[in-house]
Amino acid sequence: MPFFRSALFKNIVWGTLVLFVAVGLFSLLGEKAAEPENLTLNQVAQKLAAGEVEKITVRENELALDLREGKKAVARKEREASLTESLTNFGAGAEDLRNVQIDVVNPSGWQVAMSVLIPTLVPLLAIGLLLWFMFRQARGTANQAMSFGRSTVKRSSGQERIRFADVAGLEEAKAELTEVVDFLRNPKKFQALGAKIPRGVLLAGHPGTGKTLLARAVAGESKVPFFHVSASEFVEMFVGVGASRIRDAFLTARKAAPAIMFIDEIDAVGRQRGAGLGGGNDEREQTLNQILVELDGFDNDTNVIVLAATNRPDVLDPALLRPGRFDRRVMLDMPDRKDRRAILDIHAKNKPLDKAVNLDVLASRTPGFSGADLANVMNEAAILAARANQKKINQLQLLEAVEKVVLGPERRSRVMTDQDRKITAYHEGGHAIVAASIEGSDPVHKVSIVSRGMAGGYTMKVPEEDRSYKSRKQFLAEMATMLGGFLSEKAVFGDVTTGASSDLKEATAVARKMVTRYGMSDLGVGTFGQTQEMVFLGRDLAHERDYSEAVASRIDAEVARLLAAAREAAEQVLKVNKAALDAVASALLERETLEREDFYEIVKPFNLEQISVQA
């Protein structure tokens, strides 16, 4: 069945059609307009005697007769005899011949040639065209077979516009890569001190932190050939093709040495071996083995530095990370507030901003955002401004873009009953009041009952400053805030809804992590349970329970105790600040959205008391 879908079969069909069309045209062209009467010489002589013939045209041994009343006729004579001799022999008189116009037409040379060649050449040309299509397809297939094991590594033009100055933050990463570029451009400076050129540099970090952007900056800063390829291009269904492409890629880079080669998403072929899946001839494993040999095999005198990027350094094979291979690792962290401000400046260069725009506020609203997220925020803000037919981007559109990236677009078309709006207002108001009253909680930046994505409403809390660690007090405050919406619904309406399901799930997960991972419970130091990752099957598929049933019961009891403490603190806050909750809910029903200043202005007269979670 695949043959009938192949290009070869299509060419055969087209060639056959061309042949039939050519033969048909030739038949049509050779067909005469009207079939004349075919006469013998006896009949021609009789018609001459009867005076029915007006004109005779002689073409070699062919006779074309024009008869009276516009009729046509044809006849044939002997090739050796003349027309008068032939007709006289059949009884035509000299007087009869004198009364008839006789034209003798001698055919030209090209007509003779074409009359012979056309019937022969047209079929031959059609057959030749068909064979040409078939041979061209066969030649293309042969070329594909010969180039099947070649890599698709691409060489940078050297005119890349990206430079290190165009990459905000990541100062340590840029310093490491600047050293690599300098090593290739000025190797004698390092060799004089006995330094060896690094073989591989691994760029590792979360998605969107700028690994590929840094590689492009290396291409822009480097004055040596820069080759780039995706690791997934080495993987094929046929065993050995990936290894062949690896050899071809490194051979290409060595010919241009000193050079840099960038392999994106190297975990596509560099995953840990020996996972129990696939045989010893597994294509991925052979490809990885060839990379290991090329990086640090017997041939280690080459001046080719390999850059590789991955989001999952934890799944890479240890042999890939040993000294002599990817022994230099560059970690790309999420940008802090200062770096986010610099990234926003870069992405705002080609966008007209209103004079009132304050990018510092935007940087403070986006903790945990990667460089790609920030670029997306600026792009979404530009789209919002264009939809509003504005010439410049304002601050509200930038803040709206942040919420759109985090939660999704607004769903104002979603129909909500008055009761649902009231429940949502008290739910989000409960989150906000508890967050503003619990010690260790982040300040409230926005409260809204406008649906976004899957959320009916949302409460946005943003820390005052970026932090790398989270304390036990902050975890407890976070749990109490999560339970605030659930408890507010129960206190006001005497019932609960499914809207709190996500909050309850997150609060339970935080409490369990505090007990089993962070040692933040009365069970003491130590962790409970280990998660084993099956590298080729995904994450968190096997959980090893390294504790007894008695300890499991204590873990469950401790999780319940932490949740109960967070619930007790949240209930106390809502009981004491019922009036503030009513005020916030009323404002939400009226305005739908409260910014930070609006929220704290509403709760200011109530003097919210700060309460800590006792656990």
Image (cartoon, rainbow, N blue to C red):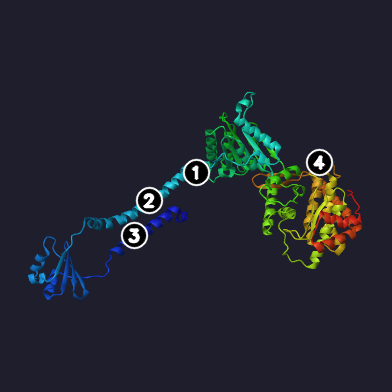
Taking 275 as reference, is 424 left or right? Answer: right
Local packing at callout 4 (Cα closer than 10 Å; few below 14, some 14-19, many 20+) is few
On the image, the x and y values in percent for residue 217 come to 63, 39
Query: Mark 4 highlights which residue?
Result: 526
Give the mark nearer the N terminus: 2 vs 3: 3
Taking 16 as reference, is 611 left or right? Answer: right
**Disc 3 residue type (three-letter):** Ala
The answer to whether the residue labelled 1 contacts the one labelled 2, judged by CB atoms less than 8 Å apart, is: no
On the image, the x and y values in percent for residue 169 come to 71, 40
Local packing at callout 3 (Cα closer than 10 Å; few below 14, some 14-19, many 20+) is some
Query: Mark 1 highlights which residue?
Result: 148
The answer to whether the residue labelled 2 contacts the one labelled 3, judged by CB atoms less than 8 Å apart, is: no
**Disc 4 residue type (three-letter):** Gly
Looking at this view, is 388 or 253 the one in front?
Answer: 388
Q: Residue at x 77, y 59 (%)?
A: 457
Local packing at callout 1 (Cα closer than 10 Å; few below 14, some 14-19, many 20+) is some
**Disc 2 residue type (three-letter):** Trp
Local packing at callout 2 (Cα closer than 10 Å; few below 14, some 14-19, many 20+) is some
Query: Mark 3 highlights which residue?
Result: 22
Tag 2's secondary structure?
helix
Q: Which callout, 1 or 2, points to the residue nearer the camera?
A: 2
Spatial CA span between label 1 and label 4:
54 Å
Q: Residue at x 70, y 36 (%)?
A: 172
Give the mark nearer the N terminus: 4 vs 2: 2
Q: Is residue 370 above or below residue 411?
A: above
Give the mark nearer the N terminus: 1 vs 4: 1
Query: Mark 2 highlights which residue?
Result: 132
Give the mark nearer the N terminus: 3 vs 4: 3
Tag 1's secondary structure?
loop
